[in-house]
């Protein structure tokens, strides 16, 4: 009912366990997430339920985000994206950075991903070992934005600055 009244929410926290009622609730609110400044999702989903986003909040933080795939991230229109316990890998980060450089993810201001799958075992990201990206500044192909990459143990952070 609150979404029907077009109320705006500063923060909405959802902890999913995958119940039938939660699935129905998600389907009701997912089209109104533009009314939410920050959405925090904590989940222990069963394998037959993955939330579908038909709108995006300004900021999204997902704890236990294994279900949030590369495809989900590339479709995300949020300004700030934080994924904890992701299953994204180096090759996924390579795709994300290449897409961002080409002008995709136009709203992105900050991206933080923690994943045990991020390794420095020789798999290339933008033609470099992962450790070589630490502190690197990247520019979009059109030169209108730059991003600073910071690495931590199994963590990649990207902060975007716009020149527009």
Image (cartoon, helix red, strand yellow):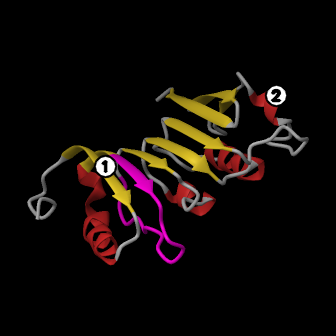
For label 1, the crowd category at 10 Å Cα-Cα, with few meaning under 14, some 14 to 19 and many 20 or more, is few
Q: Position of residue 55 (x, y in %)?
A: 35, 61
Closer-to-camera residue (86/147): 86
User: Looking at the picture, does residue 146 appear above or below residue 5?
Assistant: above
Per the image, label 1 sits on a secondary structure element best described as strand
Please say whether residue 91 is one of the residues in the magenta stretch.
no
State the residue position of label 2.
132
Q: Position of residue 139 (x, y in %)?
A: 65, 32
Instruction: Give the dominant element type of the magenta stretch: helix, strand or loop.
Output: loop
Using the image, tell me which numbered label, if any, was put on residue 13. Answer: 1
Per the image, label 2 sits on a secondary structure element best described as helix
User: Looking at the picture, does residue 133 appear above or below residue 57?
Assistant: above
Please say whether residue 40 is one of the residues in the magenta stretch.
yes
Q: Answer with left or right where residue 32 lies relative to residue 103.
A: left
Q: Are marks 1 and 2 in contact (CB under 8 Å)?
A: no
Specify the quadrant of the image occupied by residue 118: top right
Q: Work out how far the residue at label 1 is from the one at label 2, CA to CA, in angstroms.
A: 36 Å
Give the residues drawn in magenta, as a range.
Answer: 39-56
Q: Answer with left or right where residue 141 lies relative to residue 133.
A: left
Tell me the mark number nearer the camera, choosing from 1 and 2: 1
């Amino acid at each position: 009912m609150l979404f029907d009244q077009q109320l705006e929410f500063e923060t909405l926290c959802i902890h999913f366990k995958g119940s039938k009622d939660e699935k129905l609730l998600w389907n009701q609110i997912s089209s109104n997430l533009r009314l939410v400044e920050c959405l925090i999702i904590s989940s222990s989903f069963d394998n037959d339920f993955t939330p579908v986003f038909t709108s995006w909040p300004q900021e999204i933080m997902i704890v236990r985000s294994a279900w949030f795939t590369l495809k989900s991230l590339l479709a995300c229109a949020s300004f700030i994206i934080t994924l904890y316990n992701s299953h994204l890998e180096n090759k996924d980060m390579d795709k994300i950075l290449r897409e961002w450089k080409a002008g995709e993810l136009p709203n992105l201001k900050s991206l933080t991903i923690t994943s045990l799958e991020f390794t420095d075992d020789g798999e290339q990201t933008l033609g470099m070992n992962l450790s070589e990206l630490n502190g690197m500044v990247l520019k979009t192909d059109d030169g209108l934005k730059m991003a600073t990459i910071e690495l931590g143990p199994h963590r990649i952070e990207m902060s975007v600055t716009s020149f527009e």
